Image (cartoon, rainbow, N blue to C red):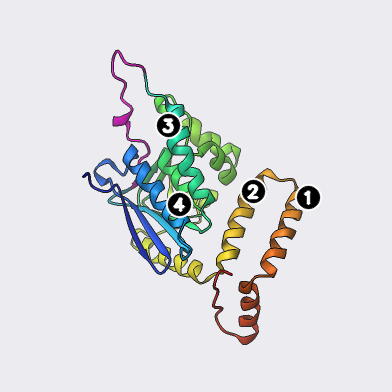
Amino acid sequence: MSEATVLCQEAAGVTWLTLNRPERLNSFNLQMHQELRAALQRVQQDASARVVVLTGAGRAFCAGQDLQERRTITGRPPADLGDSIEREYGPLFLAIRELPVPVVAAVNGAAAGSGANLALACDIVVAAHSATFAQPFTRIGLIPDMGGTWTLPRRVGSARASGMALLAEPITAAVAEQWGMIWRCVDDAALRSSVDAIVERLQSAAPLALAEAKRALQQSWERTLHENFRAERDCQRMLGRSQDYAEGVLSFFERRSPRFQGR
């Protein structure tokens, strides 16, 4: 059997998923797609899951698609890249977005192409100072995929999204933070401790509220203002009847940390 391309560590409701092709800068191949989606599916089905952290082994986060799988062979028709979007990248993007727990990207190095957009699909992105983000698709005659044409303008605005997509120039993690593309840029040595602190905060938060906040923020882009108010009303009505809300208010008055159960 080939070596696992995604390493999985689970403890106390936290799942760390590490892309594990360091010799190829953790670039995507079919096996990695299959293993990453299978890992996310296990989280989806695990009622005790609270947080997912996605990172890379070695010196890169993810360099995007492994072009060794895309080399055109003389005399044969080119690969159907639309099929790749439909079968691999699209479902992976949606699996991350639709997961009912927060997904944190710990970007430890270069994030390029679909690797950059993999990070941007996550709810919170923390990057080491040495990390970079790039959309090099036009250099090989393509457009950003893995949801990049959707996430980029929503995170940084149309002007910066166009600059990144058309010029294919990388930006540093510090610039990404300045632009609002990511949550935080930290010293390389502080990446793990910074992510651990965020994970601890998320572990102690109300699971139902986290899931509904994630969903509400994503769906707000497709709603009118009035539709969004109605959605907030319905969601708040449901959460207001939950045991977690009762516990949250009680703990406030008792001046103690809440003990949320996700009910």
Q: Are marks 3 and 4 in contact (CB under 8 Å)?
A: no
Residue drawn at (37%, 20%), measured in percent from left and top?
Answer: 78
Q: Does residue 61 appear anywhere in the picture? A: yes
Which residue in the rendered view is the most extreme toward the bottom?
Answer: 254
Q: Give the x, y percent position of residue 180.
A: 54, 51
Determine the secondary structure under disc 2.
Answer: helix
**Any magenta on residue 234?**
no
Q: Which residue is mark 4?
A: 174
Look at the image and say whether residue 62 sits in the magenta stretch.
yes
Q: Find residue 248 and report its horizontal and vertical position in percent.
A: 62, 76
Disc with the residue nearer the chain's start (1 vs 3): 3
Cα separation between marks 1 and 4? 36 Å
Mark 1 / mark 4, whichever is N-terminal: 4
Name the residue at the right extreme.
Answer: 226
As helix, strand or loop, the secondary structure at mark 1 comes to helix
* Secondary structure at numbered mark 3: helix
The residue that label 1 is drawn on is: 226
Predominant secondary structure, magenta span: loop
Mark 3 Cα within 10 Å, few/some/many (few <14, many 20+)? few
Sequence order check: which comes first, mark 2 or mark 4? 4
Chain-order first, disc 3 or disc 4: 3
Residue corresponding to mark 2: 219
**Which stretch did the figure color magenta?**
61-77
- Based on the displayed image, in which of its 4 quarters is residue 216 positioned? bottom right
**Between marks 2 and 4 in the image, the one whose residue lies nearer the viewer:** 2
Q: Nearer the viewer, mark 1 or mark 4?
A: 1
Amino acid on which the number 1 mark rests in the picture: His
Vertical comparison of 218 with 88: above or below: below
How far apart marks 1 and 3 lie (CA) works out to: 37 Å
**Residue 67 x, y percent position in the rendering:** 32, 31
